[in-house]
Image: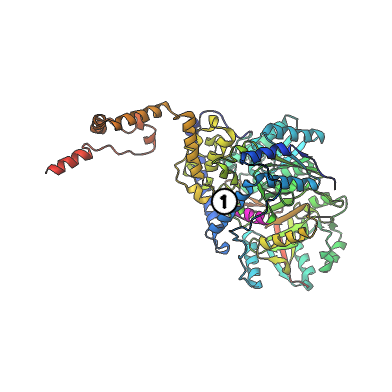
Amino acid sequence: MPMGIGDGPFHDRVEEELHNSFMRGAIASAQDGLRDKKIRATSEDPNIEDWEEWRKAGEEIRRHTIENLDFYLEQLSENFAKRGGHVYFAKTAEEANRYIQGIVQEKKAKNIVKSKSMVTEEISLNQKLEELGCNVVETDLGEYILQLDDHDPPSHIVAPALHKDKEQIRETYESKKGYQQSENPEEITSFTRELLREEFLRADIGITGCNFAVAETGTVTLVTNEGNANLCTSLPKTQISVMGMERIVPTWEELDVMVSLLSRSAVGQKLATYVTALTPGKEEGEIDGPDDFHLVILDGGRSNALGSEFQDVLHCIRCGACVNVCPVYRHIGGHSYGSIYQGPIGAVLTPILGGYEKYKELPFASSLCAACTDECPVGIPLHDLLIKHREKIVEEYGLTETSEKWMMKGFGMGTSSPPLFRAAVKSASTAVKPKVGPLKEWTKGREFPSPAKESFRKWLEGRGRS
Amino acid sequence: MKKGMIHNRDGFLDSVASSLGRTRRSEGVTVPDWVHRPQDHLYSHLAKDDVLDLFRKACRDVHAGLVETEAATLHTMVLNTIADHGGGPIIVLDDPNFSQFGLEALFERDDVYVWGGNQSIEKAEQANVGITFSEAAFAESGTVVSSNGEGKGRLVCMLPKTHIAIVPRSTIVPRMSAFMKSMRAKLSAGEWLATCVNFASGPSNSADIELKSVVGVHGPVRVTYILVADR
């Protein structure tokens, strides 16, 4: 699927999701769980001493890297190619897909296994490969579950199938794969292990994303808990890794810091179970691993942020920590955002990659509580960037609702004219009622106090006289 | 080694530089002396025994079994551990460490296949147990490191249901930072970087179904480290 998910206006999607009580319960408890895990692995882990120091290190590394992105991408490509790998710089999704389709056709590949990669979803790669008649199998458990369920879109960066309960998953497995066992997660997982093991063994091509490329050696680093990335990159004869152009570190020493930040922030682990650093250059006696290794480096709209006030969003390491503390995400869930990137990072990044026309509501889906900024392991000022988006959207599009425009105009008139202001204050207690008129949406889920019968000024005047 | 192809680089990177409001940088950029280096001084106060304790605790946290032995009894410990995990078939790396640590008898067993022949992948898939020597281990996270190469397949520790990693005590360092430094020094001296450097911490797992943690997904279902005092 592409970056955008679903059609229909934002408010309709939100309305629908608000009624999904399983999803809301699942998201609330997932947020609490993931947030607690992060706290225990970061600010409450005495062994790492000073979590804030780690965050500053992360920010420093990302800032230097993005400011010199052209240099490090050149170094990466040189070192990757020196080892016999092939690099394709793709400005757009179309270019990336065309190149990858070309490899598939050249290799006459039929069976493809993929490890989790948000960037390949952005470019709708699976669809493009299926058009060539390929069997494309997602091997990350969460992604596999969604793929089986007729390509249900992900609802969380790290735990994409969060919105599904085990009974729903069991039903999907039964109808699609003839699964006869229980809804017990161990049994479903064990069944999946056997199914996907067959896919790994017969795959012609393994496609991955890239958590961090290392410029100094031309290395692609993958971070998983399941081991699927290892199998995707050891069994098939061809490997294609797709990376967002910003997913890069200068050397292995920065890789250490970034992988530590990512593992602790995303899943509360000191290190993810498998951190696997892959470099081209298969030697004579090597039996496993790919003969051909391709790296596709995608811009896909990321350069819209470069040199702009949004540049810091490119520091993101896709840990999901911001999503796990967002009160808005907690209530509306991932699908409401209409993007594979949800929560605060989704609200900042999606309009940059996909434009304001389609995504102008997202920056407004925030209470600006700044919990996201506090959580971000690399210090991205997410709530500031949301405000900047809002300013630009209002400049470019004017106020989004006609009613809002009229309200602002009316407010402006009423407050700049003393007789109008006095009349408004006098009539407030009778005119302002919750649940109707301008306050209808606001008071759907909130109480609103009725204005007092006597205005403060009148009361003060009365006091003065007595 | 024949250089690979690079497509569309100049146009792409020229445009990156121009978005950044400057001309392209192809040289002259060095990694700064970072102001913030939290990883440098961690664990420097720990004595060797404390580092081992840290490792023991981390193994528990990542659900890796841990048994400890002296070099003289390593062979027996390996056999016992294999038996605990249900026995063969077994696949091992073609790694000189095995004979250096007195384990050559393993290679003679009927149910042991040594990685390297053309049945290697098939044997790894059929194996119940895969045995490797780790080249380094991180105490903080219960991690074992292995680099692949001739005779050292990536799949020996990934395909079988059980992975047994033999960890010589001297290879344990507090955390990843020391390893990265020493690796970079070796690379600067011209050493070849393995096509796959794998940092593995315990058995494979996932929490993708209702966030309930399940151990044993695509990689090993069970992992045991055999910590051996050096000879």
In the image, residue A225 lies at what x, y percent? 66, 51
Q: Amino acid at mark 1?
A: Val
Residue at x 63%, y 33% (from the top left corner): A2
Q: Position of residue B158 (x, y in %)?
A: 74, 53
Instruction: Give the farthest residue toward the left.
Output: A466
Residue topped by disc 1: A378
Display coloring = rainbow
Q: Chain of mark 1?
A: A
In the drawing, does residue A425 fall left or right of residue B170? Answer: left
**Looking at the image, can residue B196 be seen?**
yes
Secondary structure at badge 1 equals: loop
Magenta stretch in the rendered image: A253-261
- Depth order, front residue of A260/A34: A260
Residue at image coords 45%, 43%: A368
Label 1 neighbour load within 10 Å: few <14, some 14-19, many 20+ = many
Q: How many marks?
A: 1
Image coordinates of residue B135 in percent, x first then y, are 75, 62
User: In this rendering, is residue A222 above or below A387?
Assistant: below
Q: Quadrant of the C terminus of chain B?
A: bottom right
Compared with A177, B89 (above or below) is below
Res. B160 in view: no
Closest to the observer: B123 or A120? A120
**Quick check: is A130 in the magenta stretch?**
no
Is residue A259 rendered magenta in the image? yes
Q: Position of residue A210 (x, y in %)?
A: 68, 45
Q: Name the residue located 50 percent from the left edge and 48 percent from the top edge.
A: A373
Answer with the quarter of the image where residue B189 lies: bottom right
Residue A360 falls left or right of residue B186: left
Give the prevailing secondary structure in the magenta stretch: helix
